[in-house]
Image (spheres, rainbow, N blue to C red):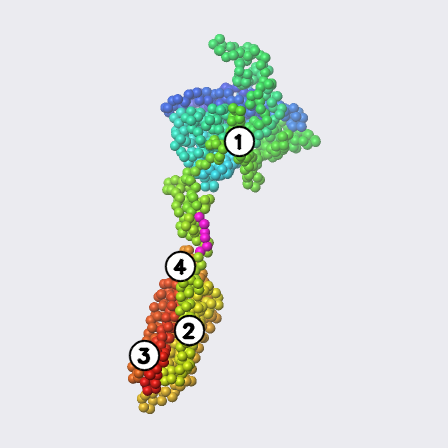
Amino acid sequence: MKRGIILFLCILTMNTVSGCESFGRFDMPSFFKEGDIMIGGIFPILIKEILSTSTFDKEPPKVQCEFDLRVFRWTQAMLFAIEEINNDPALLPNISLGYSILNSCASPTNALRAALTLASGAEEVDVSSHCPPAISALIAESGSSQSIAVAGILGPFHMPIISYFSTCACLSDRTKYPTFFRTIPSDYFQAKALASLVKHFGWQWIGAIQSDNDYGRNGILAFKEEVEKFGICIAFVGTILRTYTKDRFLKVVEIIKQSTVKVILAFVPEGDFYPLMKEIVNQNITGIQWIASEAWITASRPSTPEIYTAFGGALGFVVQKMAIPNFKHFLTSISPYTDPHAPFVKDFWEIMVGCMPVLPGARTSTDDTTKRCTGNETLMNSDHVFFNVTELRVTYNVYKAVYAIAHALHQLVFCQPVGAQTIKQCLNLSEIQPKEVSKSLQRVNFTNQFGDEVFFDENGNPPASYDVINWQLINGKVQHVTLGHFAFAANGNYKLNVQEEKIVWRTGKTVPTSLCSNVCPSGTRKAQINGKPICCFHCVSCADGTIANSTAADCTPCPKEYWSNERKDDCIPRTIEFLKYHEPMGIALTLVSLLGASLSLATMVVFINYRETPVIKASNFELSSFLLFSLFLCFLCPLTFIGMPTVWTCMLRHTAFGVTFALCISCVLGKTIVVVTAFKATFPGNKITGQFGHAQQRIIVCSCTLIQLITCVLWLTLSPPYPHTLFTYSNRMIVLECNTGSEFAFYAVLGYIGILAIICLILAFMARKLPDNFNEAKLITFSLLIFCAVWITFIPAYISSPGKFTVAVEIFAILSSAFGLLICIFAPKCYIIFLKPEKNTKKWVM
């Protein structure tokens, strides 16, 4: 493997003139300690800091590398963990771990150079010394772009790489990065956590800031995919990078100022975000609730009262904290006097103590006015946050990464897990191959001394859980207060717990709102605005029959039995409509019906009392009695049409109407035939009167009525009428009516009555000019003309009348035709009996 890496270095530095030249030493300070097994490390101990961003041209600003205390503590965690392991008799007994740690300056290019240097061993090669062992695993890097570069170049050589702070979900791709592991959850999980936080507080309209690298771009992409599932819109995505010119930062600031969003997610490393933070503070942009990714929410540099004026109350997620008690003593023992050649310790000492250490053999410039140390300074009583080891997050990730490698090496070398009683080496240290270490890492599963379970899934990711962090100003200092927890279950579900009452919001004590459009009031729905995200909409009133409450995104149809109220925010029961007895129309029709029935009975009483008079005898007392009885029933039929339809009333109303009117018209038909035969009997030799006596009259009446009766029985048997609910006549009413069941049977009953009436009309019309003073044929003709006119106009009126008026039209037709028959046929006779008794003689009638 070492030969392959050196060959790759040679190719990188190939010159067309001189050919392959030496790559040279990696000119960066490094930590190195030889051991039986070597572990590499890459940390951005020096970060690029922008010196000047005042230019507005296209040239990048001047930058320099600046010492980062937080990252320096990460490197010390690696040294501390290796020291603990070397002193642990149960873990890798009689085997010492060494390390070689290089600085990347947070640059993918430098990270790549450092990785190649470590893998090839070129950093330690010296002609005067032996060749140290090659590294068996690598702990790198903090930034996702750096890790992508490192994993991409070392992956084909099966070098196991464990990152402590690279969260890009793209690194979980085992086809591209087969030996990449990490002790920090993937952004796939962080994106879900951030999306659930946004959903939890009801923010629908948010902005986003991303870094122009793999971490920012992939993080925002994963976040957008998650929030779109909840209908949340991203108003803008600003892109920044620490090396951008000031005008590019100002463009992002201008986007923020012009936007209506009140919540912004910054998925950016702290180094890239800090220049923008300072510009936002300078322009006094306040009132925005910031959501942070884990890369900057607990960073110390922006956690100042000055930055807090614009970013106070920020919310974000970080990996769970852990305390490493013995680590504090290790940190406080760092001193330039202990090891004058230790890298970065001089920078560290100047920051911690505030003076420059005077080391043996070191040259000092006469122009340097920096305060010189006396040599009595100590870190033992320092209260600097650097020495607070009770809330370690990324530092603990580095610590876990070292122990994961140690456990993998132990299983590989001793062929059994740590803690086994019998310890026997089964593999020579010189035979250790990075590929085998990677396989052993995939099988690592142990619980450390802090009760934390350490293992990797099939994609090299650890268990995912986060703490919810809130920026709060306490006693003049910015504190990262833990106010909740977010955890993923094995089945993919997650749970968010937040102590909302303890959150300090940027906008005050209440949860800020961030909406493109205000929530539509009750009774309205969202109408999408063309060209705008789904969160931007107009509110339009719901259509009739639909409602919307304050939480509904669209109008919901009311159930069939209900209708929307005037405000369109509630469904109210529809009015049930049918012809009722107690309403004015029902009362009027009932009274008219009872009046007709009473007149029929009264006329029958008159006919019975005056049955021996010539007028009654001439009108055929028996048929007249049958006719009056049928008219009495016809007048009572409308009473079955009034009131709530039931199964029995629906079957009764149509069949009773059909049979009674068939009986009525049959009686009229009999009377008409009697009149016609009486006229024919005036001719000599005509014997038809003798052939059409009372028996024949009864047969005609009964047979004609029987046909209708059979039709009605078949109707009730095969497809009877039934109560039916109609919703189409009116939006606010439900019409209860009787469905005929069979339209054919209904119109067959009507048609039969019509046929009888037409036959009667034709016969009566033929006898209308009989030469006598009492021509009953004229009366029958006139009554049947009224009857036919009523029922001819009934059909279109019946079809077009809505709701209960359909029933009223049918009742009106029944009553009109019945009154027509009663008045036209019997009124003249009653007139003669009571007002013209002198005409009630046989002579006048004849």
For this rendering, which residue is in front, 398 or 433?
Answer: 398
- Which amino acid does the dot numbered 3 rest on? Lys
Q: Position of residue 518 (x, y in %)?
A: 42, 40
In terms of sequence position, does the residue under pointer 1 or pointer 4 come before the other?
1
Residue to which mark 1 is pinned: 469
SS for dot 4: loop
- Which amino acid does the dot numbered 4 rest on? Tyr
Q: What span is in magenta?
A: 569-574
Give the numbered dot on residue 778. Answer: 3
Identified at 44% across, 77% down, the residue is 706
In magenta stretch: residue 572: yes
Q: Quadrant of the C terminus?
A: bottom left
Residue to which mark 4 is pinned: 729
Label 3 or label 2, whichever lies nearer to me, is: 2
In terms of sequence position, does the residue under pointer 3 or pointer 1 come before the other?
1
- Which amino acid does the dot numbered 2 rest on? Ser
For this rendering, which residue is in front, 534 or 39?
Answer: 534
Local crowd at mark 3 within 10 Å, few (<14), some, or many (≥20)? Answer: some
In terms of sequence position, does the residue under pointer 2 or pointer 4 come before the other?
2
